[in-house]
Amino acid sequence: MTEYTQIFKGTAFSSTSPKEVQTLKDYLFFINADGTIEKVVAPEHIDYQTLLDTYQDNENFHQLADGQYFLPGFIDLHVHAPQWAQSGTALDIPLYDWLNKYTFPIESKFSDLDFAKEVYEDLVSTLLANGTTTSLYFATVHKEASLLLAEICAKKGQRGLVGKVVMDDPEQNPDFYRDADTQTALADTEEFILAVKELAKSTKQGVYPVVTPRFIPSCTDGALKGLGELAAKYDTHVQSHCSESDWEHGYVQDRFKKNDAFALHDFGLLGDKSVMAHSNFLNDADAELFAETGTAVGHCPISNAYFANSVIPIAHLHSKGVDIGLGSDVSGGFSPSLFDNARQAVMSSRMLEDGVNTALAAEKRGVPNSRITINEAFYLATAGGGESLSLPIGRLEENYTWDAQIIDTKIASAKLPIFDKNEDLNDIFQKIMYLVRPENISEVWVQGNKVHERTK
Ligand code: GUN
Ligand code: FE
């Protein structure tokens, strides 16, 4: 008989396509020693009752209580870990000023490993408590503190993809916060990649080094070229910011006479394991290049409302075949919750579709066919994120990892408004997506291990 490390019984929601969420009512999930879902069994299956009889009295059998549901763990495609220390502040100024007045000064403090430890431990715990089981992180320029973030993810059980940030251009970055020079930036990145690969050998859920040019404006051509070569040499993930705001998009057009997408491609930075944050100003040729190369968009809807001067046309990019996931962009986005970001993704898309300027006639106000549904936003936070990272995560299906959140709709301090004992499960799913607060997330599992449990 196969040994399973954990067996779960309950009702789960999981995406089967961007628009469709499947309800798996009272299913059994069998988890193997790797933390992978080895078998999923529906109540209609002929072996269901026999399996239940065999396992239900075991210590490792977990049956959800009435009012509890499984969701896949969320995948945050864009978190600036050091910026957690300034979350919610200074959101009233443009991107360029925000970076120079607030963000670079706070990030420079992460040369202090004690400070880094305090902030990073708090952030990783907070993200887990919010249901985020995988995060794609920007750390800072500091090699040691970046490695510390990977170690904290490893220790706390989160799947962390971590980048040491490169910003080497002395013309564009302040003296108090940048790489010493191009060669040092590349050498530090290579050492960082090797150290995280070493750490990964003893980390069940995986930690991954990520090649991370902050964005084109902060990097010299030499650094961008060298980083493309390192990504190829070590087959790493790559992340950056792409076509985020009018200022940033314009800067790249002035420097390279092309858009970010093609400029990044010239340096070997686009590929199946590349995730580009924001990407609001992609034109159709850029989107086709993303689709061809397998490059994903990390959509950060809350941050975009402050810094991107625009609403990204998510529905259009999906129709072009671009992989898309969701990002909090802490702290350009103030919230560490992908529930909050999923809600904003839907609301922003509705505002894009209808338009916002009441001085214009209704038919001239918006961009038709731009709305996305809450099902699509859920897909972005789960399966879309997994596809963006080319990892088997984000779905509660066989051969995916057991990364899951247990949602409790009945806890006293945050009870969901469910009054009908036979309420349609699709309606319950929508209530979960719109109304859940961190208190409702009673347990979080990554790769078959429990990594968070709500304490009353
Ligand atoms: N572009 C370059 N750096 C950053 C950053 O930290 N946040 C955001 N939103 N955009 C950036
Ligand atoms: Fe960002």
Image (cartoon, helix red, strand yellow):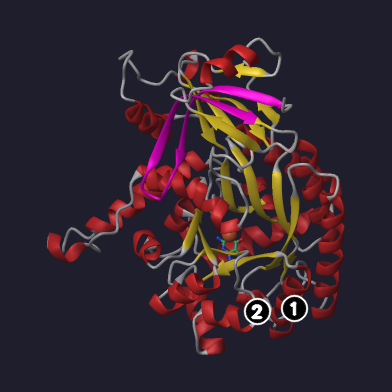
C-alpha gap between disc 2 and disc 1: 7 Å
Residue 186 position, x and y percent, is: 81, 74
Q: Is residue 274 above or below residue 8?
A: below
Label pair 2/1, CB-CB below 8 angstroms: yes
For mark 2, give the secondary structure.
loop
- Please, which residue is most extreme toward the top here? 57
Residue density around tag 1, few if under 14, some if 14–19, many if 20 or more, within 10 Å: some
Residue ID for mark 2: 268
Left or right: residue 114 compared with residue 386: right
Is residue 192 rendered magenta in the image? no
- Between 60 and 176, which is closer to the camera in this rendering? 60
Q: Which mark is residue 229?
A: 1
Range of magenta residues? 4-30
Q: In this view, does 125 lie above or below 440?
A: below
* Residue 61 seen: yes
Left or right: residue 310 compared with residue 3: left
Image quadrant for the N terminus? Answer: top right
Quadrant of residue 355 in the image?
bottom left
Left or right: residue 72 compared with residue 85: left
Q: Which amino acid does label 2 sit on?
A: Gly
Quadrant of residue 222 in the image?
bottom right
- Between 401 and 399, which is closer to the camera in this rendering? 399
Is residue 5 rendered magenta in the image? yes
Residue density around tag 2, few if under 14, some if 14–19, many if 20 or more, within 10 Å: some
| Most common SS among magenta residues | strand
Question: Which of marks 1 and 2 precedes in the sequence?
Answer: 1
Residue 452 position, x and y percent, is: 67, 28
